[in-house]
Structure formats: C-alpha cells, structure tokens
Amino acid sequence: MSDAAAITELLYRYAELIDDGDFDGVGVLLGRGTFMGVAGAAAIGELFAATTRRHPDSGGTPRTRHLVLNPIVQVDGDRATARSTFCVVQRTETLPLQPIVVGRYRDAFARDADGWYFTERIVQVEMVGDVSEHLLMDLG
C-alpha cells in the first residue's frame, strides 16, 4: 500500500469509529497526537463521550455517517499532512435524513516502525445544521 493510501485509510477509519460510537477507538486512533488541543487516548475518548450523543436504539451509535471527501495527502519522508472535506449526515426517529455539519480536517502524521499515525487533527467547522440529536452541548 502506498503511503498516501495508508494515510487516507486512517482518515476513513476515524469516520468508521465515530459512526460506530467507538469513542475509545477514536481515542486510540488519535491518541499519539492531539485532537483540537486535547492529548492522549483516554482524554480524546472522554471528550467524544462527553460531547456526542449515542442513541440506544441503534446499539449506542450516534446514528451518523461522517463522509470524508477530497483528501489531499502530501508525504515528506516520515512526515505527512492531509487536508480533506467532511460532511456529517444524520437520521433519527425525530430528525429526517439531512446534513448536520460540514467542514474541513487538517491533519498531520508521522511514521515509525509500526506505520503511519496521527500527530494532530484540527477540525474547521464551516456550516452547522440541526445538531440537537448529535451533540450533548449547545453550540449557541
């Protein structure tokens, strides 16, 4: 697998983990770096658990799909960066299927003997819809 493909797979793995409601897994995936200034797997997992609603009727998932689009990966030896667009869609019993958040990811990576890993993820939110069924906090 090429370096760019391995890094792109990390982008997609994040989306899969969060949509599965596996916030501990998100913490492990991002935990060797920082997520929006938060460091460490446990702290990152706790941040997601404290801010993201899980719906019991869906097995504890957020009932979302995080779509990662247009990834642009730049590799420089054992370091890399990626920028991509994301769109989160959601449907619940009370919310029809719709986009709820759109923005960009700015990511940095490093490689060691075990492969590529995140060193930083920055989320730039550009558009927000109805997140009342997704977040446990008020953005207003």
Image (tube, rainbow, N blue to C red):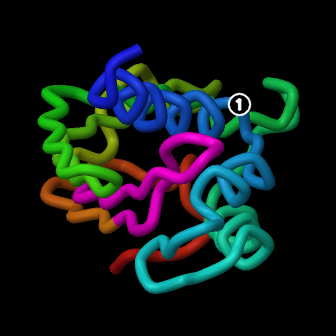
Relative placement, left or right, of 66 versus 137 is left
Residue 17's image quarter? top right
Q: Does the magenta stretch include residue 116?
A: yes
Residue 75's image quarter? top left
Q: Does the magenta stretch include residue 24?
A: no
Residue 117: percent from the left, percent from the top? Answer: 51, 51
The one nearer the camera, 12 or 4, is: 4
- The residue wearing badge 1 is 20
Q: Is residue 137 above or below residue 94?
A: below
Q: Residues within 10 Å of mark 1 (few under 14, many from 20)?
A: many
Q: Give the range drawn in magenta.
A: 105-121
Residue 83: percent from the left, percent from the top? Answer: 17, 48
Q: In this orientation, does residue 64 appear?
A: yes
- Helix, strand or loop under label 1: loop
Q: In this orientation, does residue 103 appear?
A: no
Name the main secondary structure of what is drawn in magenta: strand
The one nearer the camera, 48 or 118, is: 118
Q: Kindly identify the residue that appears in the image at 18 percent across and 51 percent down.
A: 76
> How many labels were placed on the picture?
1
